[in-house]
Image (cartoon, helix red, strand yellow):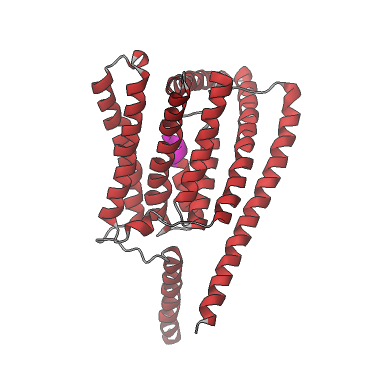
Amino acid sequence: MDGQQEIEPDNQDSNDKHSSEVQQVNNSDNIEMNFDFSPIAAGFIGLFGGFFLYQFVGGFLTLLVLGFDIENAPVAPMRLMTIAGQILFILLPALLFAKFFYNNVSAVMRIKIPKLKEFGLFTIGIIILTPLLQTYLYIQNYFIEVLAKNNQSVQTLKTFFDSLDQLVEKSYGELLNAGSFPEMLFVVFAAAIVPAVCEESMFRGFIQKSFELKIKPFYAALITAIFFGLYHFNPYGLFPLIGLGLFFGFAAYKSNSILIPVFLHFINNLTAVVLYFIFGEEELSNSASLNNEDLFSQSILFIVLMLFFIALIISIIKYYNKQLQGGEYASMSKL
């Protein structure tokens, strides 16, 4: 018994030391809370606070300004309200939360200029990921169609999803519709630039960074990505949105710069806007599915793109490991 009592403090010290080391790795920027409060709780305050402010307060103000007949509201004021809502109820709260909870706003928000090579690597990633997720969407919807034909419950759920998807398509279509080149530029600003800056500041800035201070980076990015997908109210696009969010989170963590996920988000939205300008409303549809003949070819394409994407992720991890080893070597050489 005496021997056991002597060993236990050593085990406890070892566990405390390991826990301390994990926290140091997760908190390499020396971020501290302004008061005794959990970073996890702070992250969820950002999630639910931002959701409430944007969806409910922003929605209420939109109704006050534009009236209850939203479908017939002028599109220009609607775009302005969308921009104002993103800035006032997503970007501004992210900055205020970071200032309120933490001692180092720039570290929490990942204010750092990355290298051009980092931009290049992650840009290749979004170029591969975009058709990969679109291919997944086609395959997913094919099997939903098959299940709906054989199961009444699935058919009922699909009918609800279709109506919600049509509502999303209609609202986005009205915002994206442009009759002149200057109006197209304004649409790009409203639908690609502003959401990229505002949403990434909240999700990959304040929220994910808060989670990273207490849990493993992968889980921090995954939890943030799940809520990012839910936030967009897009039933068919939920899993692709989570996939996008997870990649944005991976980019934010590896680069430790908010600029890279902002750029990736912008590229993704810009692609959707440009394709809408070219092909019209059909490009917004998330409920389109395949026929039997196309299923095999799309499945092969999905596998090929997935292999390319996995190879790129491995390359990115190796790149940052090499950078880390180079930094450690440089630090040792100065001693």
The residue closer to the viewer here, 139 or 14, is 139
The residue closer to the viewer here, 81 or 167, is 81
The quadrant the N terminus occupies is bottom left
Residue drawn at the location 67% of the way across and 23% of the way down: 290
Q: Which residues are magenta?
A: 227-232
Say above or below: 252 vs 135.
Answer: below
Residue 185 picture location, percent across and down: 45, 29
Residue 75 picture location, percent across and down: 37, 19
Residue 147 placement: quadrant: top right
Q: Is residue 231 magenta?
A: yes
Residue drawn at the location 53% of the way across and 37% of the way down: 268
Q: Main secondary structure of the magenta part?
A: helix
From the viewer's perspective, tell me whether residue 98 is left or right of residue 161.
left
| Residue 81 appears anywhere in the view | yes
From the viewer's perspective, tell me whether residue 299 is left or right of residue 125.
right
| Residue 287 appears anywhere in the view | no
Q: Is residue 25 magenta?
A: no
Residue 22 placement: quadrant: bottom left
Say above or below: 15 vs 60.
Answer: below
Say above or below: 3 vs 277.
Answer: below
Residue drawn at the location 34% of the way across and 43% of the way down: 91
Residue 323 picture location, percent across and down: 57, 66
Residue drawn at the location 29% of the way across and 31% of the way down: 58
The residue closer to the viewer here, 274 or 158, is 274
Say above or below: 266 vs 174.
Answer: below
